[in-house]
Image (cartoon, grey):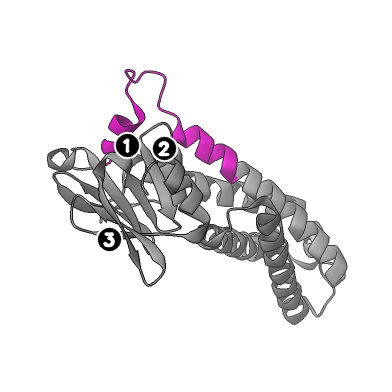
Amino acid sequence: MHLTHREWQRLGFLVALWLLVTLLCAVAGPFGTHEALGFAGRAAYWAGVVALSILCTTLLRRFVPDSLPRKIAFWSAFALVLATLIHGINSIVFGGQVGGGLGYMIAIVGATVLVANGLVYLARRWLANPQPTEAPADAAALFLRRLPLELRGPLVRIEAQDHYLKIVTARGSTLILMRLGEAVEALDGVRGLQTHRSHWVSLDAVTAHRRVQGRDVLVMSDGAEVPVARGKRDAARQAGLF
């Protein structure tokens, strides 16, 4: 599965962030690492710690809840776990002489997670915008540029499958490496609706609505049956789907 230009940009941003933070920490030597290690040792130590932080953050972003209170609770729990893990690593490697107490480490890691998420959010906003030199186009046309030319037809539905999205158009289907939340944001203004945490549908491609064991299901023009989550029923009803 090849990466799109936008996905290479995102990967490049994460690598650049890792290198920059690692270099700054290796030079400054925070949490007592300046006294405990030489420059090479600090670079190796912080390269591992920063890589662990970025990797965990990137992997866990796909599980972030939708509501703001749940997001705050999710990232607070993540910061607590990560701080405990780093504190444990420090205790094993340095005998507890580096990094201060657990409370101090939790505060530092919490602030770092907040800043990292802010930077990732700004980067995604920047990457989501078309380049100024691009000719004007609607959101659906811009989104379809991610697909092979022969599949660029009217959108039918999008289905999340692990780290990939199955994009179904009137001309066929393919997989792309992308989060559903990013796809929904890119399709803002298009006649569609996210009906489930794993599904987005084009309103024009819905052919029927059924109730299956007390749950709402939408029948699509490609024959697929897409579930409607309880929290999405009102939006689906307002869209005229049932």
Badge number at residue 225: 3
Q: Nearer the viewer, residue 5 or 166?
A: 166
Task: Tell me the amino acid under the disc marked 2.
Answer: Ala
Q: Residue at x 60, y 60 (%)?
A: 47
Badge number at residue 175: none
Image: magenta residue range: 120-146
For the residues marked 3 and 2, what is the alpha-carbon distance in whole angstroms? 24 Å
Determine whether the residue tagged by mark 2 lies in a helix, strand or loop: helix
Q: Quadrant of the N terminus?
A: bottom left
Q: From what the image shows, is residue 169 above or below residue 215?
A: above
Q: Nearer the viewer, residue 118 or 236?
A: 236
Q: From what the image shows, is residue 235 above or below residue 230?
A: above
Q: Nearer the viewer, residue 1 or 26?
A: 1
Q: Dot 1, how many residues are within 10 Å of its Cα: few (below 14), some (14-19), or many (20+)?
A: some
Q: Which residue is mark 2?
A: 186
Q: Is residue 133 left or right of residue 118?
A: left
The x and y percentages for residue 238 are 45, 41
Q: Residue at x 37, y 33 (%)?
A: 190
Q: Earlier in the sequence, mark 1 or mark 2?
A: 1
Task: Tell me the amino acid under the disc marked 3.
Answer: Glu
